[in-house]
Amino acid sequence: MTLLWEEEIAGGSHWSGVIRRGVVLRLTAAAADANVAALFFNREQPLERYNMADTLKAQHTAHLTTGCVCYTDMGRIVCSIVADSCGWHDPLCGLTDDALIAARYGATRFQEQRNARYVSGRQAMLVELGKFGLGERDLVANINFFSKVVADESGALSLVPGHAKAGDFVDLRFEMDALVLLHAGPHPLDSGGAYAPSAISLRASRGEAPAADDACRVRCPENTRGFINTERSYA
């Protein structure tokens, strides 16, 4: 694949940008226990965006890994997971908010800490949404890449520590022109202690168009129809 660009998101920081159809974006964890929250929107029609419920229902799963795709609320596919060294990414637990961050790690203020202050996932996403004319009503359920969450007998969810190792990666092949928002911050179920979220490196490369036997396309009949719906919008 032809490398297009590389960039790093510092731990606790956020990022947004446009990723074109056919580009593969690799997210790589710089340290163990990384977490990066992600939101995806159709670049041309942002009212179309990643839909957690349809993504899980269509693929009969409660977690994401290689072979899974991320559906929009229009039945199309915004991106496919074509490689993954972790084996599990959390689509259920959402974002941290300001109250949770202050209670777990301590309160910080821009006036004292400047860019070193602790920013919640919710605030990070609102800042990035605002750059594209979007706002609070566009803040939908996100994916937490590199994080694994399990349920006990009562249904309570907990984060599995040590799931992600330094150097773990996930490759997202974009099936439509997309607006991508990322926040390299703590998972909402992180046990607390020191505030030390891992940095995440981004590597964008020109990929190959999905073949007829592409693993994501043939994972289930729903995915095959999702690819057809997506490809027709570019015909």
Image (cartoon, rainbow, N blue to C red):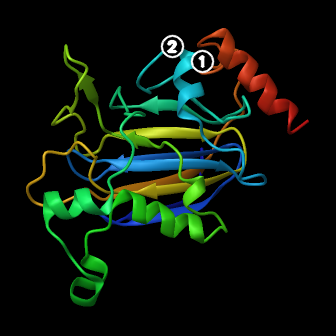
**In terms of depth relative to the viewer, which is nearer, 3 or 80?**
80
- At 43% from the left and 38% from the top, the residue drawn is 170
- At 44% from the left and 27% from the top, the residue drawn is 64
Judge from the rendering whether residue 226 lies leftward or rightward of residue 113; answer left or right.
Answer: right
**In terms of depth relative to the viewer, which is nearer, 217 or 108?**
108
Q: Quadrant of the N terminus?
A: top right
| Residue 99 locus on image (x, y percent) | 26, 61
| Residue 43 locus on image (x, y percent) | 72, 54
Amino acid tagged 1: Ala
Judge from the rendering whether residue 3 lies leftward or rightward of residue 165; answer left or right.
Answer: right
**Residue 9 visible in the current orientation:** yes
Say which residue label 2 marks: 60
Judge from the rendering whether residue 70 lies leftward or rightward of residue 165; answer left or right.
Answer: right
From this viewpoint, which residue is outermost toward the left? 193
**In terms of depth relative to the viewer, which is nearer, 153 or 222?**
153
| Residue 109 locus on image (x, y percent) | 25, 81
Amino acid tagged 2: His
* 133 w.r.t. 89: above or below: below
* 150 w.r.t. 193: above or below: above
Mark pair 1, 2: CA separation: 6 Å
* 112 w.r.t. 36: above or below: below
Say which residue label 1 marks: 58
Density class for disc 2 (Cα within 10 Å; few <14, some 14-19, many ≥20) is: few
| Residue 22 locus on image (x, y percent) | 69, 43
